[in-house]
C-alpha cells in the first residue's frame, strides 16, 4: 500500500505549539493517538512540502477536468 491507496479511516488532525517551543501534530483515529513534535524549522519544511503537494494535486485535478 502506498500514499495513493484509499482507506476508509477517519482521523482528526490538530496542529499547535507546545510549551517547550515545539510544533505538535496530533493525530487521533479511533483509539489511537499519535503526537508528533517538530522543531520550528522542521515544521516549516513540512508546511512547504504540504503546499507543494497541494499545488501538484491542484494541477493534476485541472488536467483531469480538461479530458
Image: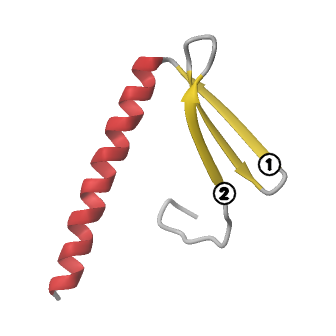
Residue 63's mark?
Answer: none
> Who is closer to the viewer here, 16 or 28?
16
Percent x, y of residue 32: 80, 48
Picture layout, residue 54 above or below residue 63: above
Task: Label 2, secondary structure: give it.
Answer: loop
> Who is closer to the viewer here, 64 or 31?
31
Locate residue 19: give its quadrant: top right
Locate residue 66: give its quadrant: bottom left
Q: Are marks 1 and 2 in contact (CB under 8 Å)?
A: no
Tell me what residue is drawn at x 60 percent, y 25 percent. Answer: 37
Seen from this angle, which residue lies furthest top?
20
Percent x, y of residue 50: 37, 45
Picture layout, residue 59 above or below residue 65: above
Percent x, y of residue 63: 18, 76
Residue 11's mark?
Answer: 2
Q: Is residue 52 left or right of residue 38?
A: left
**Label 1 Cα neighbours within 10 Å, binned few <14 / some 14-19 / many ≥20:** few
- Check the picture and name the quadrant holding the C terminus: bottom left
Task: Label 1, secondary structure: give it.
Answer: strand
In the rendered image, which residue does mark 1 sit on?
A: 32
Percent x, y of residue 64: 23, 81
**Label 2 Cα neighbours within 10 Å, binned few <14 / some 14-19 / many ≥20:** few
Tell me what residue is drawn at x 26 percent, y 73 percent. Answer: 61
Amino acid at each position: 500500500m502506498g500514499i495513493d491507496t484509499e482507506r476508509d479511516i477517519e482521523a482528526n488532525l490538530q496542529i499547535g505549539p507546545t510549551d517547550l517551543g515545539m510544533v505538535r501534530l496530533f493525530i487521533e483515529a479511533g483509539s489511537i493517538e499519535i503526537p508528533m513534535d517538530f522543531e520550528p524549522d522542521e515544521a516549516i519544511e513540512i508546511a512547504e512540502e504540504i503546499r507543494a503537494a497541494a499545488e501538484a494535486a491542484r494541477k493534476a485535478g485541472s488536467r483531469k477536468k480538461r479530458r
